[in-house]
Image (cartoon, rainbow, N blue to C red):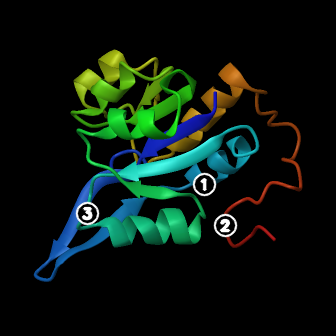
Amino acid sequence: MKAFILDVDGVMTDGKFYYSQEGKIMKQFGPDDNDGLSLLKPYIEICFVTGDRKGFAISKKRIADDMKFPLHLVSTIRRVEWIAQNYPLDQVIYMGDGIFDHYVMKKVAYSIATADADPLARQYANHVTQRSGGNRAVAEACLHVLERFFQPYNPDALPDEQIKLSGEWAV
């Protein structure tokens, strides 16, 4: 596998958008997902896609600025085309939750849906997490990908010092 591509809204977040009179002001991102991604990063390229143009700056702050992963604005109905232009479809793992994500899931090598994903996404996913989007589903998916395609995470050993873990406690 060459790439792990994740949708943002409903996967990294709880899928809710918070609005004020000025417009979209907030998204809720869950805990531990960046740590799971840190464990997986040495094995595979990781990037994120979002179709949320109005909330792009919010997603960019968390994904690109804070977590240092590439983030691309890609229409939810043009994702298969975008992925095919950038990666061999048979070497992509995709994680999504939305009503149109099953189109991608049918074309890539391996797909993961969150527990609270749209029924079509869950139906076409190769794996469905036990956790919901924004509630450690990505961390769970990372451990699954490590076990299935690379080297299982060993909870009895500290991660390699080369892996930069998230959180203010990490030095």
For disc 3, the marked residue is 53
Q: Could you tell me if the residues under marks 2 and 1 are in contact, i.e. CB atoms within 8 Å?
A: yes
How many numbered dots are placed on residues in this image? 3
**Percent of width and height locating residue 20:** 15, 78
Q: Is residue 64 above or below residue 128?
A: below
Q: Residue furthest left?
A: 21
Secondary structure under tag 1 reads helix
Task: Quadrant for the C terminus, please.
Answer: bottom right
Task: Quadrant for the N terminus, please.
Answer: top right
Secondary structure under tag 3 reads loop
Q: Could you tell me if the residues under marks 2 and 3 are in contact, i.e. CB atoms within 8 Å?
A: no
**Percent of width and height locating residue 142:** 61, 37
Around disc 1, counting alpha carbons within 10 Å, would you say few (fewer than 14), some (14 to 19), or many (20 or more)? many
Of residue 81 and residue 146, the one placed in the foreground of this image is 81
Instruction: Identify the residue at image location x=34%, y=17%.
Output: 124
Secondary structure under tag 2 reads loop
For disc 1, the marked residue is 34
**Percent of width and height locating residue 122:** 33, 22
Cα separation, mark 1 vs mark 3, equals 23 Å
N-terminal label among 2 and 3 = 3
Q: Amino acid at mark 2?
A: Gly
Cα separation, mark 2 vs mark 3, equals 28 Å
For disc 2, the marked residue is 167
Q: Is residue 128 above or below residue 86?
A: above
Cα separation, mark 2 vs mark 1, equals 9 Å
Instruction: Identify the residue at image location x=49%, y=40%.
Output: 86
